Amino acid sequence: MKFTVSNTTISNNFLSIILIIILSTWSINVVSQEVVRYTLNDVIELAQKQSPDAQIAKHRFINSYWVYRNYKANYLPSLSFASTLPSISTGFKDQFVGGVTTSVFENVNRYSLDLLLQQKIGFTGGSIEVSSGLLRTDNFKSDTTWHQYTTNVINFGLTQPISMYNPDRWERRIEPLRYEEAKRIYVEANEKIAVTVIDYFFSFLLAQIQVSIAQKNYSNYDTLYRIAEGRYTLGKIAENDLLQLELNLLKAEAAVEDADLNYNNRLFIFKSFLRIKEETLIELVPPSETNHFEVFVQTALEQAKFNTSSGLEFQRRTLEAERIVKEARNGRLDANLYAGFGLGQISNGSIQDAYTQPLDEEFVSLRISMPLLDWGRTKGDIKIAESNLALVETSIEQERIDFDHNIFLNVMEFNMQEKQLMIAAKSDTVAQKRYEVTQKRYMIGKVNDVLELQNAQIDNDNAKMGYYRSLMNYWKSYYDIRMLTLFDFKRSMPITIDIDALVE
């Protein structure tokens, strides 16, 4: 017996083998691909550590930290060194000798070394300094050459502004407030990141659940449609019911595609915000416990005023406005006292002689400057500053009212979440049970109304999604309360940060 094999058969067999190999490889890759499960707490911790918002908040705080460090350094002693190596001067210079001014030609090199120690006096706005220096002058002339040493063995100096307005005093009141405010803003930013990532978490979780629901509905409608085809053949159901089930099947198939698209979109957004670059399968674990507790409005208000940045911001803005008023009332009076005492010497011989029997030097200078006629400009500056202070105080008063009202609303909303979540959970249970009963009754022929089955399925899907949305609202409300008060009501303690670890 002779067998013949066509080229088409060989080609089809070859393609089948290739297809089997590709599918096997894809299956192995899917099985070997790691599945990473994230709880809500995992996601919040990850977001507060590496999300873009977390990095921005961190660097903003670090900037404020170093600004404050620089402010504090201004009130610490500063030591500086200056040197001129060399300073060369060649040319004509006027000299006044015996009442006669003459021009002489000079060729001079100068070398100098100076050491200066300075310290600001914060409560007076002045500064003191201690200095020491050495100057060597080499004068090269055609007829003679000489060297001279001039020493400033030690010199004490005082600079003191004489004014009713002391900027250093106001700075010492405002800058610590500004730094403490920056710390609290960072903590609030962390809590705000938690609120933000809860949206991403539950949006992705809902997309994940929607895919599961869509696939389950498609499988159920496919089964029901096949059963309906048999019943229609036997004349047990009308053609209209069969067509309705076919339509539901087509809708379920489209819903699967829509759910897959939404899932991939939410997955991309989720990974992007958390900076997850690994090509891993992600599965979110829904929060199983809420441990609900009641928050009292008065407690929340007290903790908010004590812990948040808003209270410090109100205080800082008021102080800044008061400082402007004080500065304006000081007018343009500019008075400064300069005083100093030092020991110095000049030697045309050796450098040792320049430090032998130094002579004392003293000076006192008081400089006063004030306008005599400014056409009411000073008065105008005062009025502008006072008006600005009144505006700031009025704005702060209204902002305090709005702040308290916002906390009140959020506390009331949070306290409602327990009941809302219970209702959503009960609705989900009832809707699921109703759908299961209706589906079983339809499959055994006790229910022939397709629309009743369809409505049960829609109610079941909506109830399940509604439960998870209610769960999302609960956690968002909880973290909103934390952000507004900077207080952990579960542990009854303020929310703080480790500054040392943050600025390492």
Image (tube, rainbow, N blue to C red):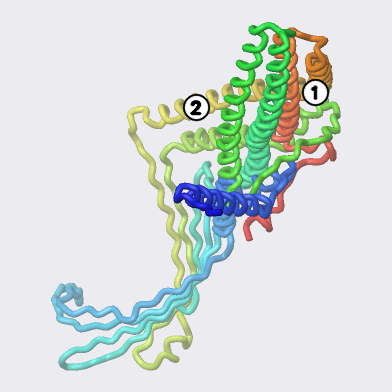
Q: Residue furthest front?
A: 1
Is residue 175 at least partly visible in the picture?
no
Task: Calculate the distance from the C-alpha at mark 1 to the C-alpha at mark 2.
Answer: 48 Å
Mark 1 or 2: in front is 1
Q: Nearer the viewer, residue 114 or 176?
A: 176
Residue 194 in the image: state x and y as whole percent. Answer: 67, 39
Q: Which mark is residue 466?
A: none
- Quarter of the image with the N terminus in it: bottom right
- Quarter of the image with the C terminus in it: bottom right
In this figure, which residue is indicated by the disc labeled 1?
421
Q: Earlier in the sequence, mark 1 or mark 2?
A: 2
Task: Please report the residue visible at 72 percent of the width from the left and 34 percent of the height from the top.
Answer: 479
In this figure, which residue is indicated by the disc labeled 2?
388
The image quadrant that residue 405 belongs to is: top right
Q: Nearer the viewer, residue 320 or 9?
A: 9
Above or below: residue 457 compared with residue 154: above
Residue 94 in the image: state x and y as whole percent. Answer: 17, 73
Number of labelled discs? Answer: 2
The amino acid on which the numbered mark 1 sits, given as a three-letter code, is Leu
